[in-house]
Each structure stands twice: as C-alpha cells, then as structure tokens.
Image (cartoon, rainbow, N blue to C red):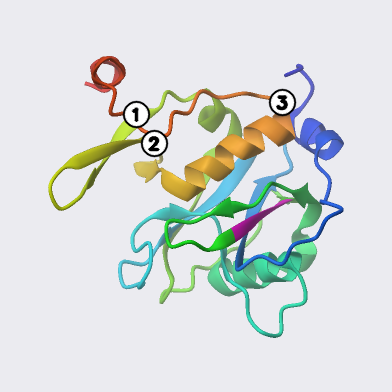
Amino acid sequence: MTDQPLTQLLQQRLRFSKRIQPAHAAVLIAITHEADPKILLTRRSLYMNNHAGEVSFPGGKRDPNDTSNIVVALREAYEETALNPFDVKLLGDLPMERSRSGLLVKPIVGLIPPKVQLVAQPTEIDRIFFASLKGLMHSTPSPYEVRLAKQSIYFPSIRIENEVVWGLTARILISLFRYGLNYQKTWPFLLNSPSFKSAIFKKID
C-alpha cells in the first residue's frame, strides 16, 4: 500500500464487476471522504430475527422491485439510516460473500460526506457509529466466542467503539482492504489453534 490518501486509492482501484450476478442481499460500505476516512457501521436491533445485536453494514435482502445490487444497497441504507442515496459517490463492488444462512451478499462501496445526517430506524437498528478505516486495518484480531451445543469455537474479530466486528462483516472488511487498498490483513478462519489463541489472549488481557 502506498502513502497516498486512502480515499484516492479506493477510487483508483475499485470498479464494478463486468459480470453482473443478482445477489440475494447487498450491503453498502459507506466511507467518509476525508483525510482520516471512517466507515459507517450499525448494530442490529436485538429484536431482529437474524443476526440480532450484531455489527453490520447497512444493507439487507433484495425486494422483488429492486433492479440491481446497487439499488438494494442504497435502498436498505436509506431505510435503516436515512442516508440519502444522492450523497453516495459509488466506487465499485467487492466479490460476493455468503452469509451463515446461505445468502449470497454483494458489497457495494461508496464515498459519503464526512458530516451526513443519519437517523437509525428503531425497529432494525440500535446504533449507528463510525470506525476509523486505518484503525480497522491495523487492529489485531481478537477471539470472539461462539457457543455451540457441546463446545465453543473462536472466530477472529475486531474490537472497536465498544463493539465486536466478526463473521460476514469482518470478512467484507478484509476484502475491502485487499481489493480496495492493496492491503493483505492476516485473518484466519478460526482462532482455535491453542498456540495462536494463547498469544491473542495475552495481547488483550
């Protein structure tokens, strides 16, 4: 990665895929256009049926009337945060990701003004916040425990703004770093390796 501004690098590297595949859902990675860019994140309501209480990008499932993945991302961002679609400068998309429930999710990347007025839709979103792009890039993965019926497994996560970013949202961030910023962040699928987990726990104790 070069020393040029991150937003400039994003604009140079990102494009929209020529091969268009309609996704089941789409998310908007909205990044403030400023010297120290920040990413718009939300915490989903505890009353949601899926991924309740988790940190995510604005986004959601495709509606029958949605004509493209871009439309899905912009519509959902507006419904969840009141982000005006005309305030978004679209840059490109990232490779398709698959959610835990099997949905194909397309990430759409765009720049937004630093001081947009946002309002959380209370039935869907508990909190809207911004996280430093540089801070996310250079953070150390920490273990996030997911309890199953007979055991616990540990996924890599990023702790920021008193929130935990993991799972699909974290994987999309790693993809943004790679394709948008030419930055390869180490991100194991699981942190269940005893030696690796021990090293991580020592860093966060």
Q: Nearer the viewer, residue 53 or 100?
A: 100
Q: Residue at x 42, y 34 (%)?
A: 189
Q: Is residue 149 left or right of residue 48?
A: left
Q: Counting residues from the N terminus, which is met first, the one under dot 2 or under dot 3?
A: 2
Q: Residues within 10 Å of mark 1 (few under 14, many from 20)?
A: many
Q: Mark 2: which secondary structure?
A: strand
Q: Quadrant of residue 27?
A: bottom right
Q: Position of residue 93 (x, y in %)?
A: 74, 50
Q: CA distance from mark 2 to mark 3?
A: 21 Å
Q: Which mark is residue 182?
A: 3
Q: Nearer the viewer, residue 23 or 166?
A: 23
Q: Position of residue 135 (x, y in %)?
A: 52, 29
Q: Which mark is residue 150?
A: none
Instruction: Point out the stretch of residues depicted in magenta.
Output: 105-109
Q: Mark 1: which secondary structure?
A: strand
Q: Are the residues at dot 1 and dot 2 in contact (C-beta closer than 8 Å)?
A: yes
Q: Residue at x 77, y 27 (%)?
A: 5
Q: Position of residue 20 (x, y in %)?
A: 80, 60
Q: Where is mark 2, residue-wise?
A: 157
Q: Nearer the viewer, residue 181 or 114?
A: 181
Q: Is residue 36 visible?
A: no
Q: CA distance from mark 1 to mark 2?
A: 5 Å
Q: Position of residue 58 (x, y in %)?
A: 56, 61
Q: Where is mark 1, residue-wise?
A: 142
Q: Is residue 49 above or below residue 129?
A: below
Q: Amino acid at mark 3?
A: Asn
Q: CA distance from mark 3 to mark 1?
A: 23 Å
Q: Amino acid at mark 2?
A: Ser
Q: Is residue 51 above or below residue 141?
A: below
Q: Counting residues from the N terminus, which is met first, the one under dot 1 or under dot 2?
A: 1
Q: Quadrant of residue 199?
A: top left
Residue at the extreme left = 150
